């Protein structure tokens, strides 16, 4: 469904760069973390769209960014959902706190 919107935009204005986000969501990670999502295609007027609603503070890791082969105005960004307990995320957050607040050591 999203690719249809992107293709329409590409035909409408050839001077723009368009991005499509490809999301990988491991249900095992979302069940054991504060990541919350709702898949409401069962309740949707258009169930074929397979809509998913995310909470504002959900965190995705950017896995890959690439320009599509078929169209140089279209980019794909691969995202993977992560959790608050992700050790790399915790390390990054601690580093930012240290840089902003100064070292307490």
Image (cartoon, rainbow, N blue to C red):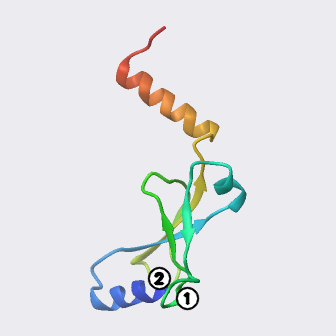
In this view, 74 is above or below 7: above
- Foreground residue among 102 and 56: 56
Residue at the limit of the structure toward the front, as seen here: 43
Residue 54 image offset from top left, x and y in percent:
49, 63
> Residue at point 59% right, 57% down?
81
In this view, 94 is above or below 77: above
Residue at the limit of the structure toward the right, as seen here: 28
Left or right of residue 80, residue 103 in this image:
left
Residue 70 image offset from top left, x and y in percent:
51, 84
Residues under labels 2 and 1: Cα distance? 14 Å
Rendered image: mark on residue 32: none
Left or right of residue 97, residue 40 in this image:
right
User: For residue 10, which quarter of the picture?
Assistant: bottom left
- Foreground residue among 60 and 74: 60
> Residue at point 29% right, 77% down?
16
Tell me the mark number nearer the camera, choosing from 2 and 1: 1
Question: In the rendered structure, are the residues bearing label 2 and label 1 in contact, judged by CB atoms less than 8 Å apart?
Answer: no
Residue 65 image offset from top left, x and y in percent:
51, 63
Binning the other alpha carbons within 10 Å of mark 1 as few (below 14), some (14 to 19) or many (20 upward) gives: few
Instruction: Give the residue pinned by disc 2.
Output: 2
Number of dots carrying numbers: 2
Instruction: Give the residue pinned by disc 1.
Output: 47
Circle 1 SS class = helix
Residue 105 image offset from top left, x and y in percent:
49, 8
User: For residue 13, which quarter of the picture?
Assistant: bottom left
């Amino acid at each position: 469904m999203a690719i249809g919107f992107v293709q329409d935009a590409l035909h409408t204005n050839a001077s723009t760069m368009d991005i499509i986000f490809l999301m990988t969501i491991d249900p095992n990670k979302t069940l054991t973390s504060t990541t919350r999502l709702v898949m409401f295609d069962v309740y949707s007027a258009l169930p074929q769209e397979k809509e998913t609603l995310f909470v504002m503070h959900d965190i995705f890791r950017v896995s890959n960014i690439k320009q599509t082969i078929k169209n140089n105005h279209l980019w794909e960004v691969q995202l993977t959902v992560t959790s608050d307990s992700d050790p790399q995320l915790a390390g990054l957050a601690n580093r930012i706190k240290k840089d902003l607040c100064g070292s307490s050591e």
